[in-house]
Amino acid sequence: MKEEKLSFFKKIKMSIFDFDAYQELAAEKISRTIGYIVLLMLIFGIIVGAIYVLKFVQGVNSTKEYIENEISEISYDNYQLTVVPNSGEEIIRLEPENTGIKIIINAQTNDEEKINDSINEINNTANGILILKDKIILKSEIYTKTLQYSYKTISETYNINKIDKAEVLNILSGNEIKIFIAMLFAGIVIYIFIVYLSNMLVDMLLLSILTYIVTRIAGLRLRHSAVYNIATYSLTLPIILNIIYFVVNAFTGFIIQYFQLMYTALASIYIVTSILIIKSDIMKKQIELNRIIEEQERVRQELKRKEEEEKEQAEQERRREQEKKEKKEKEKKEREEKKEGKGNLGNEPEGDNA
């Protein structure tokens, strides 16, 4: 019988809503299970990347509007950037609405202490951009370290020598920023995919150990591939909830404490429940099998009894036929003897009385 190939979305539905289906999912090939978790992580990376890019675009639009209205001068020459606001402030701080990004512009001073204060301020934010005279520093909660790009490197890469306010606005509105956004999106997706998939492999290993322990306690002996599959599919709902939580957190700032603990606990609940259901199903099948065996034995005994009865009837019939045959032969013999007796009586000599 040809094995039915389950679709990706059907697996999601089964692994979330149907504990009984874990027996079928456990029988999946390892390659298909790995493909399933890889695709799920890719979708996660795309969603996260899209959110970050959306927030970045909102930040770019807000920055563009701020430059148009609040910045009097922007100049870039000899790998040095100068930004002069209308207000005369030395350090500019922006937090565009609904982006969660903090932007600090400190491009008028060479004071190391003030520069270090700005760097520390960016390091203490979840997502931020620090623009200095000689470099730009990016901080994101998805990266473990801040990213630094010197203007010299950017200038040599993109052949930028001089720039002013008008050109900055053109860059923020032109193809350059679109290309950068596309590259940013691709970079975030790849980074998120690699990092979260690596973390997921560790979670799957730990949950596989838990699954093995639960199966042994339940008295089941499953193949290692089945144990791995159950552990993997148990992560489906936690991953989807993680995606939802990330989206809500990105746009509202809502935080759930001990989310990782809940994440692991939920997967553990799915594992224990699915194992118990598999155990119950196996027990039901065993009971049904025993019933079938008992029924087969009863039928076998009944057939054997009928066969013996048929043999006995056949033997009785054979005996009756034999008795009939013997009786006929006896009657025939008696008739012949009577016939012979009459013949002998009619042939006696008559001259003895003369």
Image (spheres, rainbow, N blue to C red):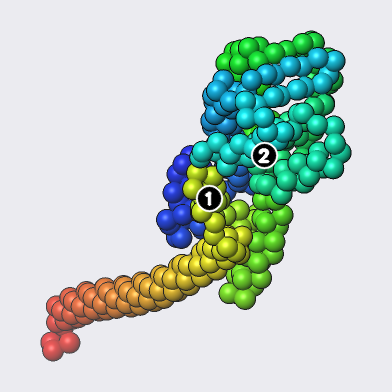
Please name whichever residue, 250 or 216, is drawn nearer the observer in this view of the structure.
250
Residue 128: numbered disc: 2
In this view of the protein, which residue sits in the foreground, 278 or 108? Answer: 108
When asked about the image quadrant of residue 208, the answer is bottom right
Q: Quadrant of residue 31?
A: top right
Does 14 sit above or below residue 215?
A: above
Q: Earlier in the sequence, mark 2 or mark 1?
A: 2
Q: Residue at x 72, y 54 (%)?
A: 202
- Please say if 172 is above or below 279: above
Type of amino acid at the residue the image marks with label 1: Gly
Is 127 or 340 nearer to us in this picture?
Answer: 127
In front here: 211 or 203?
Answer: 203
Q: Quadrant of the C terminus?
A: bottom left
Which element type, helix, strand or loop, lies under badge 2?
strand
**Residue 240 shows in the view:** no
Q: Position of residue 269 (x, y in %)?
A: 53, 66
